[in-house]
Image (cartoon, helix red, strand yellow):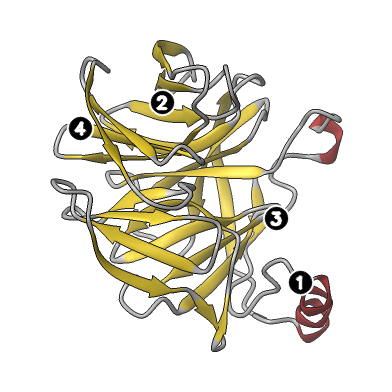
Amino acid sequence: MSRSVEQGRSPGVSLAVLALASACSINSGQPQYDIVSQFPHDTSAYTQGLVYSAGRIYESTGRLGLSQLRQLDATTGILEASVALPTDRFGEGLALLEGKLYQLTWKSGVGYVYDATTLVLQDSFNYSGEGWGLATDGTSLIVSDGTSNLRVLDPQTFQVTREVTVTDDGLPLSQINELEYIGGELYANIYQSDWIVRISPVTGEVLAWIDLAGILPADQRTAATDVLNGIAFNKDTGHLFVTGKLWPWMFEIRLHGLPN
């Protein structure tokens, strides 16, 4: 099935700008996304970070006492393995770099490093500020904290090597959440919305907006269903895996304009 994907300027979290954007028909081309497949997602999983690698999806989940690192089969969604975080830690963003999984926590200022094959905890590290989303460009770690600021960390020392401010049409854009690095760009969920933004990691400029409104139909939402969150990229197919916090489904989608 297909849904519309709207690219160009977007509202972020401003309802006023959203109304203006809709009225102006930002992108008359109306590119589409296709749902390639979908499979069940654990409705107790408060999705914070998502990574795809070699037929598996790694998921970081949040909430105190319930936070985990989870390994899923990428075709069925079946849970293959999991590791619980300490009960006082709220899991956040996740990234895979050189055989290691890096996981953030929200307000604890502590991150964890696991062996990606065994999920055995190897190390921990400290950082300042909140941890939200996490991605890697293959060399560094890139951290969001809910503001318009992104921090680039050295994966050996975890020191900040560079910072960049995310802007849309020259204005700072906050609520930057889960991150994924794809083809030289950062893709980011905007918290409390159904929008994903494409960001230049060099300048911080928003390059495009992708609207995933309706990917989870209204009749499948309940009072417990939370917001869209989670982006994982399969470079072999060019497809994305997306889901949400406490959602019943994970979706594999094809965006027109991404490599196949």
How far separated are the C-alphas under marks 3 and 2?
Answer: 25 Å
Q: Secondary structure at mark 2?
A: loop
18, above or below 226, in the image: below
Q: Which residue is mark 4?
A: 100
Q: Which residue is mark 3?
A: 193
- Mark 3 near mark 4, Cβ–Cβ under 8 Å? no
Callout 1: 10 Å neighbours few (<14), some, many (20+)? few
Q: Which mark is on residue 74? A: 2
Disc with the residue nearer the chain's start (1 vs 2): 1
* Viewer-nearest residue: 110 or 209: 110
* Viewer-nearest residue: 220 or 168: 168
* Viewer-nearest residue: 43 or 76: 43
Disc with the residue nearer the chain's start (3 vs 2): 2
Counting labels gives: 4
Q: Which residue is mark 1?
A: 14
From where the camera sits, is residue 240 visible?
A: yes
